[in-house]
Image: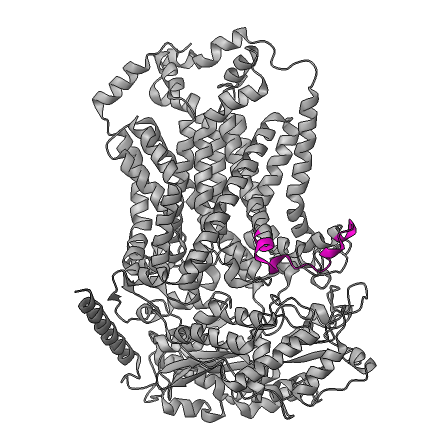
Amino acid sequence: MSAATETVRPPAAVAPREVRPPARRPRPRVGKILLGVLGIVVSLLWVFPVYWMLLSAVTPNARLKASTPSFLPTHFTLANFTSVIGDSGFGGALRMSLMITGVTIVLVLAFAFLAALAISRWRFRGRTSFVLAVLFIQMLPAEGLFIAQYKMLSTVGESTPVLGLNSVLGISVLYTAMLVPFTIWMLRGFVAGIPAELEEAAMVDGLSRTKAFLRITFPLLAPGLVASGVYAFLQAWNEFTTALVILPAEDRQTLPIWLRSFLSASANRGIDWAEVMAASTLIAVPVIVFFLFVQGRMTSGLVSGAVKG
Amino acid sequence: MKRTRVVATGVATSLTLALALAACAPADEGGSGDTGGTPEAGDITLWLAGSDTSDELRQYLVDTFAEENPGSTLTIEEQDWTDLVTKLTTALPDAANTPDVVEIGNTQAPTFTYAGAFREISPELYEELGGDKLLQSFVEAGSIDDTKYALPYYYGSRYMFYRKDIWTKAGLEVPKTLEEFGDSVKKLQSKKQSGFAIGGQDWRNGISWVFANGGELAVKDGDQWTSTLSDPNTVKGLEQWQDVFEGASNLPPTAKDEAYWDFLNDGTDGEAPDGATIMAPGWARWSLGDMTKNDKGEEVRDGMADDSKFDIFALPGVDGGVAPVFAGGSNMAVSAKSQHPELADNLLRIIYSDEYQTMLAKAGLGPANSDFDKLMTVDEDGNPNKFGEVTVETAQASKLTPAAPGWAAVEGALVYEELFQKIAEGGDVTAIAKEYDAKLTPMLNGQAG
Amino acid sequence: MTTATPASAIAIRRRRTPATPYLLLLPAVLILLVGLGYPVYWQVVTSLQQYGMMQQFGAPPTFAGLDNYARIFSDDRLWAVVGRSIVFCLVNAFLTVAIGLGLALLMKAVHSAVRITMQVVLLLAWATPLVAAVTVFRWLFDYRSGVVNWLLVQIGLDQYQGYAWLAQPLTFFLVATLVIVWMSVPFVAMSLYAGLTQVSEEVLEAARLDGASPRQILRHILLPLVRPVLAIVLLLQIIWDLRVFAQIRLLQDGGAPVSETNLLGNFIYELGIGSQDFSGAAAVSIFVLLLTVLLAAPYVRSLMKEDAA
């Protein structure tokens, strides 16, 4: 039995492969080149505000509001970055954000994925109610919840500090709950986009349900998981109000709260916008790293050989 | 049937409110300031807002506290100004996690005071900490009638920064009265340069005209606050402001008080400035001046080093003297749920001690105790410090926004921004004042309905 | 070749009513109850009470029935805000999804180097912290030193010298739409692209062999297969765009007529954090929830039909 399952290749891919003509036509189509150009133009336009942010981050604050805008870093300086990184809060905030977001992502993707499977691949009693409940929860504005969230964690924290205020787990539980509904919805859509027949075909060929799922459906879901994962990452990474009240201690703040401190004028200075831009750039970096890492892993290892030629 | 329910709800609500107020009212807890015996050792937390209090000052507080209260420690946590209210709203009522002493903005103090967030400061302790020598307008912001809850911590002030070179060229001198100011800046007005660069929504500066004319924004009668924009003096002040805005400022009516120094400075390539005069808080100084390099080699403005180009003066009053301006600054209070009230009071004693007040003044922060004001007017070498002088001068005449429980809501809803915008757009001040009085009076009194 | 009989597979499922779906749902349900249960309950209860600063600091909240709702509905500002919010929300949501779909299709059609460029750019836009993004747009449209005015004057449109984009509601919302679309499209584009890649290459090849034009492939194969994802992202955009707050507030800070540019998100904020009228904020939140359900009704109805099928 095990020998059989190992040698069986996903059936859907086998038959067409034999009869398929060469995948690429000999000469590249003009249309494709034009579209490529369009893609580049769109990219340039879309990246312009990001470029502006980077430009401001490497310009001295005193030169930011110039009467003639300069599109190149004529007064290049790294002083904003050094001062922002040197700020005592940065290291700690980075650590907190990484830990909280890390825990949250794992929990969210795991729980939401299982739930999405359940509601897409099975019919059972209570399914509609659950689906509706999840939908409605998402529609409730989260802005007013922080008071209750604080009270809850404060009470819990008295008996279980590891889940209370200023703890990583406590806020991660809150974030997971806040992100699971949306993630279930997203993943449900992706799972629904993969016909169950693919698995069934594999099962007919002798694969167990789980194996069929892992070999066929899961790799196809990879891009969907990445998209949902990045979204959840960003939400947790940039969340502000809940973190503000749940993590009141100065050394337990997350990056968004740390960034906020650059936005208040004080008795000694106005807002240093160049530093705000430098700080913002630093906050964006881990997200890019996460995406590139996940994108690389997902599209290479899991997808190989399964369906694509 | 419905009416009885409404009446019942109304009665229940008023009873509850009365009970709540009674609960908030000065309690019997043996009052603060009881120095009978040393308090139990404990660890207390102080929340400071923003970075105004320097590290040196903070270290002093921590060290002195440890010395005077053997076995106890003080931890200082810095909180951000922008969201301080939200954090205090959740943390202060929570006995297990509340900070013991907090710094809070003077405009935010009334809301929290009325809500019962703070522990009462007994008359004895108040006297010990400075009594009537403390900046009274700030004391009022933190009191309910005569009971004190939050005391002034430090004050800042706002005054006029101007281009002396441009004024002199036009043959104008520092104005002595408010009207002279208006005339001067209108004379300096041109298409490219505002005589007085002020935004239409800038009420924080604009209300100086109201105060200068003897007007009030709101008054308290018994328990109720009433918005008094329609008061003849207030209308006079607003109209005068409207006149100055229309005649001397090129900024849109929707502009807020923001980086006015961008208007006063020469352009980065040496272009003429967009404004000849601005009104700003004292710290604007560090963003004004000519471009230079600081010790780290970074390009910054030189802080008004060239006084033939940049100088300051206090906004003059209607009949000379100094006009009352809106004072910035913060208050200090003890949390009502603090687990170590006696230790918290000891910390207050350190903050209001002569040594600390001196340190505040020397750091350029207006000390709560007016005895120490004159320290602001000289620098380390004993030379007169014009910035300190003008700060003290204007602060003495300063006023605050109404110490009403709903003031924070008014600010949060940007009501005054809109009021001033309508005036700046040239509307009929009397009619606008009436409209906004009707809007503001319920807001000033209300918390939840 | 899929010779498996779906009927028999489904028949087996029905007979057994397995515990599997329930088990799969369990983690999600648990975390939702733990993390959101109390806060949501608190929100509903508070909307029926009188709860402000006094209550936050110890005064017992009184039951106020539907008073909070009555108070809010009689506030004549509310309806203007609601109308504005709905229009803004629908314009933004549809614009975002349309552009996102376009970009997703573009990404599918271009050379992989161009595609990766586009993905990185979109990710950069997505990862930029909200504060930085809105501030950059504010600077670009600043009436004195903004790049946009400078460019317009350069090409001869002198009336834009010193033009205050944020001072009029219409141009204010133009800028707001630009910001929000710029920030939201990446998520939509990435998700739709993920959905598109799930369509197996074989199906597409077979269609091409049969002589289908790219347009026909688009209409009859791609779009129907990504419909689930498309519907979901549109729904999510509507939910979010209805509640948008931070971008509007930050733009208003740049100098704008407040009551003509306030949206529902501002309303909730002003009630909750702004004036500490927590029961009012809770009532508005519930109202927004109902409003969202109303806007999403067609979607919810089709969902129910799909489930019943």
Residue A167 appears at what percent x and percent y?
A: 39, 55
Residue B136 vertical position relative to residue B75 in the rendered view, above or below: below
Q: Point out the residue furthest to the top here.
A: A19
Q: Residue at x 28, y 54 (%)?
A: C41
Q: Which residues are magenta?
A: C153-173
Q: Is residue B385 visible?
A: no
Q: Residue at x 67, y 46 (%)?
A: A48
Q: Point out the residue furthest to the left here.
A: B1
Horizontal side of A253 relative to B344 (left or right) equals: right
Is C163 one of the magenta-colored residues?
A: yes
Residue B147 vertical position relative to residue C38 in the rendered view, above or below: below
In the figure, residue C272 lies in which quadrant? bottom left
Q: Which residue occupies the foreground of this view, B199 or B106? A: B199
Residue C142 appears at what percent x and percent y?
A: 66, 58
State the quadrant of the N terminus of chain B. bottom left
Residue A262 appears at what percent x and percent y?
A: 58, 62
